[in-house]
Amino acid sequence: MSGHSKWSTIKHKKGKEDAKRGKLFSKLSRAISVAAREGGPDPDMNAALYTATEKARTYSMPKENIERAIQRGSGQGGGESFEAIVYEGYGPAGVAIIVEALTDNRNRTAAEVRNIFGKHNGSLAQPGAVAWVFERRGSIIIDAGKYTEDDVMAAAIDSGADDVTLDGSSYEVLTEPAAFAAVRDAVQAAGIEYEQAELTMVPKTTVVLDEADARRTLRLVDALEDSDDVQEVYANFDIPEDILESVAG
């Protein structure tokens, strides 16, 4: 699992976003609406919508909020029209960063993202500058303390997963995007509960950070994630376990 995946898992377990639940729910609702608009209102037929609704459920977003967001995206509830924009940039130590945003004001969002990079020892890059570092993959995170590797491997590989890796206390099942839904469903059918299941961007290469650069990079990532328009931040940093525990604390 990449250092950024570890960091995301730690934040998820700690429930760091709970203090900002109002803002978090607004972001989740926006993502659900856009996914429903672009791929249809049925999560079983729309992988992006399934991922968005699952993420909302893991943060205890009320069911009625999820349903309203789907209705808005399907044209039943009116509301604002958002567009998806992707930004690419560099963080401390040359870390490659991709920022996915949903906005109703492209100029405002671009200025804010540029400002955040500038304040945190980073810089925006031209489109395509860092995209090659990442590939779209399905990722399923499973608590390694609850299941054996054989059980996870049997359910995942037999249903089309590419790989299962053990990193600390978690297994990560990686799939091609087209196989994600089938593998996720097979894992569930095998009685294996997952902590996270999403379509994400996985780095092909990583940059190992020392403690000083790790702190700078995570401050940049946190600032980007705190932006109202930013939905996801992907980065190719790798932080050694002992340093990650220190900076996460």
Image (cartoon, rainbow, N blue to C red):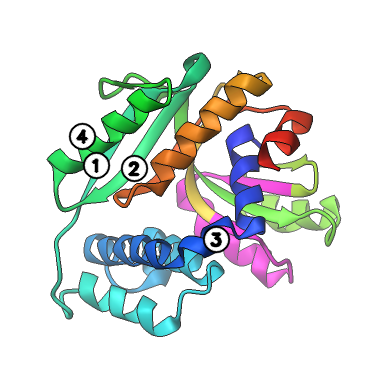
Q: Is residue 84 left or right of residue 135?
A: left
Residue 133, given in percent of the width and then of the height, sits at: 46, 23
Residue that label 1 marks: 85
Region of the chain picked out in magenta, as a range: 171-197
Rendered image: mark on residue 111:
4
Check whether the beta carbons of the residues at disc 1 and disc 2 lie within 8 A of each other.
yes
Residue 190 seen:
yes
Residue 174 is one of the magenta-drawn residues? yes
| Residue at image point 48% right, 15% down | 94
Q: Amino acid at mark 1?
A: Ile
4 or 1: mark nearer the eye:
4
Disc 2 marks which amino acid?
Answer: Glu
Of label 4 and label 2, which has the lower sequence position? 2
> How far across and how far down the image is residue 154, in percent?
77, 55
Asked whether 218 or 153 is in front, the reply is: 218
Query: Residue flagged by tag 4: what amino acid is it?
Result: Ala
Report if residue 144 lies within the magenta region.
no
